[in-house]
Amino acid sequence: MSASEERLRALLARGLSGEGAAYHAFLGDLGAHLRAFFRKRLARIPDDVEDLVQETLLAVHNQRHTYDPGQPLTAWVHAIAKYKLVDFLRRRARGDALTDPLDDELEVFAAADTDAAEARRDLAKLLAELPDRQRLPIVHVKVEGLSVSETAQLLGMSEPAVKIGVHRGLKALAAKIRGSS
Amino acid sequence: MNTDDLVRMLATGVAPADTGATARRYAAAILAGLGAAVLLMAALLGLNPDLARYVSLPMFWVKVGFPALVAVGGVVAAARLSRPGAPLSGLPTALIAPLVALWALAAVALVTAAPGQRTALILGKTWADCPFNIAMLSVPAFIAILWAMKGLAPTRLRLAGAGAGLLAGALGALAYALHCPELAAPFLGVWYVFGMLIPAALGALVGPRVLRW
């Protein structure tokens, strides 16, 4: 577990300074840990696990500026994962269908599970519902991998507007997830 | 979209994270909230005409210092409650210490006063308006601080809302102290505290709804 902590913390630190490859590795590993964590907690509703993994990864990404590098990554990730789990259960009002949702014994980094199931909710569909000023910057910058300036030229937007579109669009996507389930 | 696609999407074209956001958001919210409270106080209630004389009185500085200390504790509390997993230890002590000090002053004042004077020390002349005015002056800060918090990541929403409300209440009380004619510690220990607790309670009430992310 502490090996995971150190490895992921180093990857996140590089990711936060803008290194895409390190950040990719961080999110990939984190997803596997989250999957194992949620699978244990949602043993009786396994079909919802992948949706919650995706929702939590998006939340981690959107709130990544709240991580303090001096703080244990475990504590930060665990608080977010637990918050998202409780929020999810409340939304579903299926508090009876779970096993031990709130005990603190299980750490997020205690196990990893790379065997992803299909998500029930399709994020691509929710993405398509976003307004163009958010959707198009996300499609060009985040999906097709164009630079911000290329996207700005292509869309006839300013570079700050492209960045804001990506930022607000991903937040709006998270809000749609909360509203959709 | 499967999870690998999502991870790839999130990691593509990722910009350096804005790690100064917490400090910047709170600084903006506090400046705006306190500034608006002072303006509201001056416009609706009026500056204390005796303020020039008051600044030489130690009790005036107790009246300003108490909400200022609560505000300092409140800022730390709000900032910690906005970061997932940040430790909260030490916060209750930091928030309660100014209250204990004020109540100690109030106890001394009450014990040394003539029995017939004690009620007047507690009620002053403005007890009926004070808590309401403090709560009213804290409204801009309340909104601004909840806005700041919502852009971060509070995970204990009721507590975070209460912390935001307490900070707003302390800022409201700080502005109100420039209008308020009262100088007795027992008065402050009851009505200032009550006034600051109104937005704190309101924050606890609305936190779970407005702070969700």
Image (cartoon, rainbow, N blue to C red):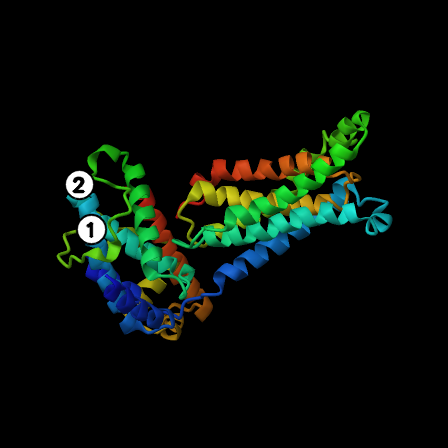
Q: Residue at x 26, y 63 (%)?
A: A2
Q: Which residue is more in the foreground, B188 or A9?
A: B188
Q: Which residue is more in the foreground, A78 or A117?
A: A78
Q: Residue at x 54, y 36 (%)?
A: B201
**Amino acid tagged 1:** Glu
Label ID, residue A50: 1
Label ID, residue A45: 2
x, y percent for residue B118 = 77, 28
Question: Would you say residue B17 is visible in this rendering?
Answer: yes
x, y percent for residue B190 = 67, 34
* Disc 1 to disc 2, C-alpha distance: 11 Å
10 Å crowding of disc 1: few (<14), some (14-19), many (20+): many
Q: Which one is earlier in the sequence, the residue at label 1 or at label 2?
A: 2
Identify the secondary structure beneath mark 2.
loop
Q: Residue at x 75, y 37 (%)?
A: B109
Q: Quadrant of residue A20?
A: bottom left
Label ID, residue A93: none
Identify the secondary structure beneath mark 1.
helix
Q: Do residues under tags 1 and 2 come within 8 Å of each other at their CB atoms?
A: no
x, y percent for residue A35 = 20, 53
